[in-house]
Image (cartoon, rainbow, N blue to C red):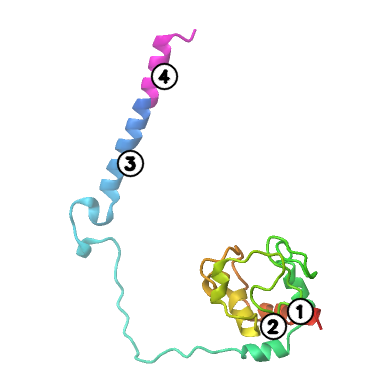
Amino acid sequence: MFDTMTFTKVLGAVCGSLLIFMLGKWAADELYAVGGGHGYGEEHAAGYLIEVEDSGEEEVVEEGPAFSELLASADIGSGAKVFKKCSACHSLEKGENKTGPYLYGVVGRAVDAAEGFGYSEALAAVGDAWTVDALNAFLENPRKAAPGTSMSFSGLKKETDRADLIAYLDSLDD
């Protein structure tokens, strides 16, 4: 049933199909490449350029309240809800490290002070202590605040969430 000739035919069919697909891709690239694929430059690129006059005025970006104002009016209950995102890797009990260090007393604590946790060298760039400003910057985008950090969290984009979380963490250790 499955002899050498059948195997040769199947292998030839598979190789032939791959060859047809490769030639099809090459033909499509030549047909649909920007400029038709025939050496046309930028002036023959597909699409239209719509020129718009510049009014010369800069757009005024409205800034919200300062972070210190948000922190003063932060909701600790909302911060507890935001912490659920952190609880997969962090604990609130002193000395109980998970994937990340425990966060009990983190506000004002030295950056690498959690006992028993091996910190990466990247956290030295954050500063000496976890001040409110350092926590705010780190929570917004950990990889930007400490390039090379092993923390895989993408960050909290909303300032109110960060303020609520920092207020919650600060409330835990009196």
The amino acid on which the numbered mark 4 sits, given as a three-letter code, is Val
- Measured in 3D between alpha carbons, the distance from the residue under mark 4 to the one under mark 1, in whole angstroms, is 66 Å
| Residue wearing tag 4 | 10
Residue at left 63%, top 87%?
A: 67
The amino acid on which the numbered mark 3 sits, given as a three-letter code, is Lys
Density class for disc 2 (Cα within 10 Å; few <14, some 14-19, many ≥20) is: some
Mark nearer the N terminus (3 vs 1): 3
| Residue wearing tag 3 | 25
User: Residue 72, relative to residue 90: is it above or below?
Assistant: below
Q: Could you tell me which secondary element the residue under label 4 belongs to? A: helix
The amino acid on which the numbered mark 2 sits, given as a three-letter code, is Gly
Image location of residue 68, percent across then percent down: 65, 90
In magenta stretch: residue 55:
no
Q: Give the range drawn in magenta.
A: 1-14
Say if residue 97 shows up in the picture: yes
Residue at left 51%, top 69%?
A: 147
Q: Is the magenta stretch mostly helix, strand or loop?
A: helix
Density class for disc 3 (Cα within 10 Å; few <14, some 14-19, many ≥20) is: few
- Measured in 3D between alpha carbons, the distance from the residue under mark 2 to the one under mark 3, in whole angstroms, is 60 Å
Position of residue 152 in the picture relative to residue 168 (left or right): left
Mark nearer the N terminus (2 vs 3): 3
Number of the label disc, if any, that sits on residue 168: 1
Q: Confirm or deny contact between disc 2 and disc 3 (CB under 8 A).
A: no
Say if residue 157 shows up in the picture: no
The amino acid on which the numbered mark 1 sits, given as a three-letter code, is Tyr
